Amino acid sequence: MIRFTDVTKSYDTRRGGRPVLGPVTGEFRRGGITSVIGPNGAGKSTLLTVVGRLMDPDTGTVHVDDVDVHRARSADVAKVVAVLRQENHFTARVTVRELVSFGRFPHSGGHLTTRDVTAVEEALGFLDLTALGDRFIDQLSGGQRQRAFVAMVLAQDTDFVLLDEPLNNLDVAHSVRMMRLLRRAADDLGRSVVLVVHDINFAAAWSDRIVAVKDGRVVADGTPEEIVRPEVMRDVFDTAFTVHRVDGRPVAVYYRPADDADEPGDTHDPDDTTAATGPGVAVGGPS
């Protein structure tokens, strides 16, 4: 389990900057997929960055089981939690296989053993990238490149995998493919996946738990059925929602003009499967 306690983070503190995170206390449970949702500027990415030790908090602590993330050795932390930031740029020209091998650095120190090579090839195979292993990263499509970076963090072989907006700039088909792979990583490889995601319905369809962040604090934490409710969504996003159930899963609809929308908190028959297919409705959940 990842536990964060009284964590705060501010930017431009010399200019009296407002805290962008916290004080926030909460947890990411072990196992399955946890999606972190919330409005822009809520502190979602900052929370993930602090938890993954890519940024020090101003105050507070983060523990992965018994490991104090910000006091333990970097090499020890890198063996229990892997994190992929939203923006990833390489100035050097590397192949897909070389990129994925970077994930083995905490184990190999840059000198790949037979076990490291096996882990790299397994990650390439898992993300369906074996045929692209010798291709340069800048020769890949956006979806292929994103899979390559996810393969790198899976090759790190940690219990927890933190992903900041892995669906960013992906179309619906590539987003569904990515979520299927992450679902398999959780179910078949036993990884605990935590991701920041903007599409509420992708979070509802693929996650075991959803953590909602607003104004730098955790305001809701529960199963998709507990979180994707009109009153909860309205409080998190300050927007009126209706929620349908499609194939047993909640689907949030939020695209209608305010003067045509139901009153905040309104919902439809739980057995109604006639969800609209306009903006704000995602498709392609697990079957």
Image: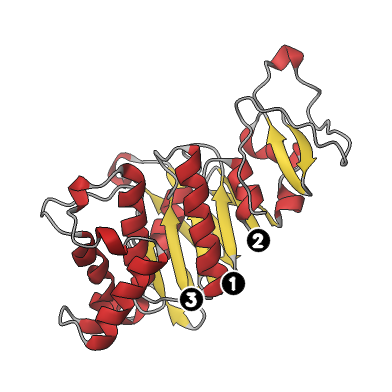
Q: Is residue 78 left or right of residue 237?
A: left
Residue lying farthest to the top in this orientation: 259
* Residue 128 visible at all: yes
Mark 1 = which residue? Answer: 31
Looking at the rendering, in which quadrant would you find the N terminus? bottom right
Q: Nearer the viewer, residue 7 or 121?
A: 121
- Tell me the crowding category of disc 2: few under 14, some 14 to 19, or many 20 or more residues within 10 angstroms, Cα based: some
Q: Is residue 2 left or right of residue 277?
A: left
Q: Sequence-wise, which precedes: disc 2 or disc 1? A: 1
Q: CA distance from mark 2 to mark 1?
A: 9 Å
* CB under 8 Å between discs 1 and 3: no
Kind of residue indicated by mark 3: Val
Mark 2 = which residue? Answer: 208
Residue drawn at (41%, 76%) of the image: 158
Kind of residue indicated by mark 2: Asp
Select label 2 or label 3 by which is in front.
2
Q: Is residue 84 left or right of residue 24?
A: left
Residue drawn at (60%, 26%) of the image: 279
* CB under 8 Å between discs 2 and 1: yes
Mark 3 = which residue? Answer: 64
